[in-house]
Amino acid sequence: MIKHDLLSAFRSIRKRPGYALLNAGGLGVGLASVFFIALFVLHELSFDRFHENSDNIYRLIELTTETAKPWAPIGYPVGPAVKSAFPEVRAVTRFFPDGTVVVKKGDIQFRESNFAYADSNYFDVFTYDVFEGNPKTALSQVQQLAISESTALKYFGRTDVVGEALIIYDIDFFVSAVFRDLPAATHQPVDILMSLTTFRTRQGDGLDSAWTWNGFHTYLLLDPGASATELESKLPALIDRLMQGEYTELPSTKVSFHLQPLTDIHLYSDLEKEYRTNGNMIYVIVFSLAALFILGIAIVNFINLSTARATTRMFEIGVRKSFGAQRSAIVRQFMVESILHSVLGLCIAVLLVLVLLPAFRTLSEISVEPAYLLRPEILLGIISLTLVTGVLAGFYPAIVLSGFRAIDSFQASRGGTKRGVLLRKALVIFQFSISIVLITLSLFVWKQLSFMRSAELGFDKENVVAVRLVDEMNRLMNNSPDLVRDKLLIHSDIIAVARAGNLPGVRIGVNEVSLGGQDAANYNLRVALGIDYDCVDALGLEVVEGRAFSREAPRDSMAWLLNEAAVERMGLRDPTSRILTLGGFYKGPIVGVVKNFNFASLRDAIEPLSIALSPWGADNLAIRYSSAQAPSVLEHVRRVFDELAPGSLFEYTFLADQVDAQYRQEDRLANVIAYFSLLGIFVACLGIFGLAAFSASQRTREIGVRKVLGASVSQIIGLLSRETLTLVFIASIASIPLAYFLLDKWLDNFAYRISVSPVLFVAIAFGVLFIALLTVGAQAWRAAVSDPVKAIRSE
C-alpha cells in the first residue's frame, strides 16, 4: 500500500511541478535558515565544553563595593589560599594575559595577541591535546613556552620543536610543549603559554601579598559532587582572616568572591578586564527566535498551499469513497504526499546550505565545515523537523477532508470549505505578522548602529591613526621622544603626535586613586595611563576648566586631567587646586578638566575618568592628520619608522575603526536579522503568490463572466487583491505590540539609544503592503487580461 501511495504522490508532483516546486521551495528556504542559525546557536552554547572537567571548573571572580561590575581576574595569592582552606577544591590554576608581544625567530617576527602566563598545573585542569613534550612539566621552569601547532608551523615550519628557542622581550624562551590548536569555542583563545614561574621571577616575592592586584584569572577544579554554592558561602570568613590590613573596614564588607561556572563565561559574563570580549545570551535568543519565526513562516506557507490544493481534490475524495475507499487509505495518501513534499523541501534546504555555507561563515564569523551537519544531533534534528513539518502540513487534508461523506465531498469540491478558508486567512495573518516583526527589528537595529557610529562622542575619532610601538621604536620613544615627534611632524598634514597607552574603543582599567587635602578620600576611577602632553590635541578633547598638559609647566612632570564625571563623583568645586595620587608612586596636581567623552561603548554611561601624564611605556602613537590623504601620511610614518628602527614591525589601526569595532556583535545581529527578514518576506510572498494563483484558478469562470459583463482590468485586480491586502493590513496592526516589546528590551542594553518612532512602524507596514500588492497583483493582472471566452468554456 505504501508503494502505491508513493507512486500516486510522484504522479501528483509530475502533474503539478510548479506547485510542488513552489511549496517545497518555500519550505526549503525556511529549513536552510534554521540549519544556519542552529549552527551558530550550537557553536555559542558549546563554549568550553570540550574540557573534560568543564562541569566542575569555576572561575573565581571578585566584586567590590567601588565598582559596578565584578572583576574577572583577582589577586595572585587568593586562589592558592582557597585551595589550602577547602578540601573540596581539587586544584587551582592561574592565567595571566600580558597583552600583545612581538615574537621573533631569525628574520620571522609577528605580534602575538593570544599570549599569557599560566601555572604549572594548567594542563591538569584544562584539556589540551599536548602531542609534543610533557604537559606535567611543560610550564614548571623559568623561560619555558608551550605553543600551539599553528604557532610552531608559523615560526619553524614543523611541530617537533621542543627545545627550540623563540625570542620574546629580547630573551630566549625555549619551547617545552606543542598542543593542538584550540577549538574556536573557547573563552581563552591562546597560542603561546609562558610559565607563570617566569612572571613571578620577574616580579619578585611581592606577588604573594598582592591581594588587591586584580590581574590573575583564577580557576578552581572542584571534586565531583562538590557544591559551588556551599563553597562560596564559606569565602567571607576566609577573606576576613587573610586580607586583614588591606581595608580599614572588615574586608568582607568591601569585597566578595564568587564562583562562576566555566561554561557560563562566554554567554553570561561581561566583567572588568575580561581576557576577550565574550558573547551574549541575548543574541543567541534573538537568533533562535529568528530561526523559529522563519521556520514558522515556511511551515505556515507549506500548510496553506497544501490545504488550498487539497480542497481541489474533494471530487477525487468523493469518487474514491463511492468506490469503497476507507478513510484510513485516504488519510495515508495525504500524509505520504505531504511528507514527500517536505522531503523535497529538505533536499532543497541541503543544497542551499552547501552553496551558501561560505557566505554564512563570513557573516557569522564562525568556522563551520559541511561535515558538521553530519553530527548525530544535527541529523536527528533535521530528520525530525522534516517529518514533523510533513505531518503538520498533511494533517488538515488527511483528517478533515477525509471525514466528509461522499455526497458532501462532491458539493464541497466547487468552493472548498469554510473551515479551510478561515484557517488559510489566519495563517496568512500569522506569517506576515512575523515577517513585519523581523523587518522592524532589522531596521531599528540598523538605526541604533547608525546612531552609535554618528553620535557626538566628545572627541574626534576621524583622521587619527594609531601606530604600534614595539621593540626598538618603543625604546627610542622612551629615550628620544622629541626626535621621533619632530620627524613625523615634518609632514604638512600631520597636526599632532601623542603617545597613548589607552585609546578610546579599548576598555580602560579601574584603579584606586587618593585625593589629598582636608577631605582626603580614596576613589575607584578609570585611569588612563601612558598618556603624553599632546593627547588633548591628538584626540580632539575639549578642556572645560583649567588647561591641558604643557611641556612648559614644570609641575606637569606628573599631572592629571579629569573628566566631568570624575569631578562630580569626587564632589570637587575647585579641582585644579587638588592633588591626586595613584598607588603611592604617582602623585601630581589636577591641571584641567575635559568635557565628558565616550571613551567606551555607547552601551555604557560615561564613567569617571582620570588621565595621568605618563608618557613612558605606552605602546601606541596617536597621529592626527588634517586631510583625507591617509595613504600619504601612512607612507611618511612608515618611512620614519624604517629610518629610525629598521626591521621593526609596522602595524596600525584607524581610531574610527577601533571605536566602531566595539559594535561588532550588533553588526552581526543587524546583518543576520536583515537577511532573515528578507527571507521571511520572500517565503511569505511565495505563499500569497501561490494562494493568489489558486484563488484565480478557482474563480476563473467568475472572472470571465465579470469581464463579459463589462468589468475593467482594474476592477478584476481589485477584486482578487482586496482580501489578501486586508489580511496583510491586519497582520501589520497585530505585529506592532510584539515588535515594540522586543525592541524595547534590546534597547535597554544601551545607555544611549534611539527613540522608537511610530512613523517607522507605519512606513514598514505600508512597505509590506506594497510588496504584497505587487505579489498578488501580478497574479490578478494575469487573470484579468485572460480571454473571458476561454475562461467560461474551461468550466
Image (cartoon, rainbow, N blue to C red):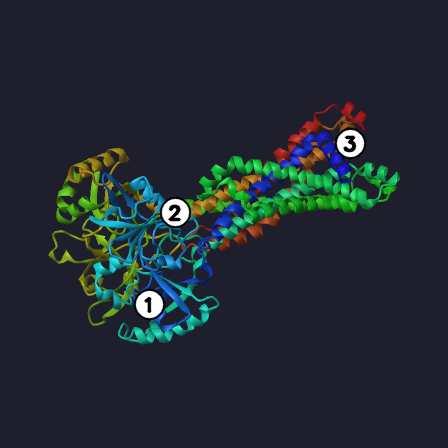
Name the image quarter holding the N terminus: top right
**Could you say whether the residue bearing mark 1 is in a helix, strand or loop?**
helix
Q: Is residue 111 left or right of residue 646?
A: right
Residue beneath the point at 26% across and 74% down: 245
- Circle 2 Cα neighbour tier, 10 Å, few/some/many (<14 / 14–19 / ≥20): some
Tags 2 and 1 touching, CB below 8 Å: no
Q: Which mark is residue 80?
A: 1
In the rendered image, residue 527, in percent from the top left (x then y), is placed at 26, 58
Q: Quadrant of residue 435?
A: top right
Identified by mark 3, the residue type is Glu
Pick whichever, 177 or 108, lies toward us: 177
Mark 3 vs mark 2, CA separation in Å:
69 Å
In the rendered image, residue 602, in percent from the top left (x then y), is placed at 38, 52
Say whether residue 434 is visible: no
The residue under label 3 is 702
Please report whichever mark, 3 or 2, sits nearer to the chain's N-terminal start: 2
Tags 3 and 2 touching, CB below 8 Å: no
Please report whichever mark, 2 or 1, sits nearer to the chain's N-terminal start: 1
In the rendered image, residue 453, in percent from the top left (x then y), is placed at 38, 45
Identified by mark 2, the residue type is Asp
Identified by mark 1, the residue type is Pro
Name the image quarter holding the C terminus: top right
Q: Which mark is residue 746?
A: none
Q: Quadrant of residue 135?
A: bottom left
Q: Quadrant of residue 687?
A: top right
**Could you say whether the residue bearing mark 2 is in a helix, strand or loop?**
loop
Residue beneath the point at 23% across and 34% down: 635
Say whether residue 10 is visible: yes
Q: Which mark is residue 181?
A: 2
**Could you say whether the residue bearing mark 3 is in a helix, strand or loop?**
helix
Mark nearer the viewer, 3 or 2? 2
